[in-house]
Amino acid sequence: MSRSVQHNLAFDETDDAQARALELTEYWIHRAREITGASARRLPVPEVLFNLRGRAAGQAVFARRTRRCHIRLNAALLASHPREMLDETVPHEVAHVAIYRLYGRKAKPHGREWKALMQAFGVDASPCHALPAEPTRQLKRFRYVCGCEEPAWLTSIRHKRAQAGTDYVCRVCGTKLAYDDA
C-alpha cells in the first residue's frame, strides 16, 4: 500500500467550494489507491470541471480510446449546497473513476465494486442525490387535441418532431394528436 496522505476533510463556509472540490478529489483518489493498492500511474487524479448543468450533481466521464477520465460537477449545486456536494458527490464520482480505471467497462456503474469502494470510503453508496435542483431549461409546451375533453401538451421537442411527421397518440383515448394552433 502507498503512504497515507493526511487531509483536513472539514469544510468552512468561507472556503472556496470549487478549490475544496479539487482538493477532495485528490484526497479520495489517494484513499482509493490505499484501499485498492493501485499505483499513481494506474489511478491518476482526474481533471475536475465545473460545467455540469441541470439536475445532475456530478458525472464521471470516460474516454474509451485514451482511457482518460474527468469529473464534471454542477457549479450551481456546489454553490448552493457545498457540504453535501463535497461530502457525497465528490467521493461518489471519484469512486466511479477509480472503478473504471481498475476494472474497465466490465464493472457496473453502481455495481458491487463501486459499492465496496464507497463503503471503504465510509460514504453512503446511494446512486442518486437528494438535493433540490431545478432544470436549467424550460421547454415551451404546445397544445394538442384528441378525442378527450382535456388537451394534451407536447414539449417543443416533440412538437417539432410532430411537425416533421412523427405521429403521437393520446394515452387515454388512443386517437392521434392534432396540433391546436388556435
Image (cartoon, grey):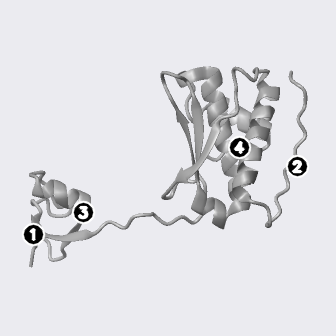
**Image position, residue 164 (x, y; %):** 11, 53
> In the image, residue 106 lies at what x, y percent?
54, 22
CA gap, disc 1 and disc 2:
63 Å
Decide which of tag 4 and tag 1 comes sooner along the chain: 4
Q: Is residue 2 above or below residue 72?
A: above
Left or right of 86? Residue 148 is left
Indicate the amino acid at tag 1.
Gly
Q: Residues within 10 Å of mark 2 (few under 14, many from 20)?
A: few
Residue holding disc 1: 147
Circle 1 sits in a helix, a strand or a loop, which is it?
A: loop
Mark sitting on residue 156: 3
The mark that comes first in sequence, 4 or 3, is: 4
Residue at label 4? 91
Q: Residue at (71%, 43%) from the top-left corner? A: 91
**70 lies above or below 73:** above
> Which residue lies under the disc numbered 2?
8
> Do we see residue 110 in this rendering?
no
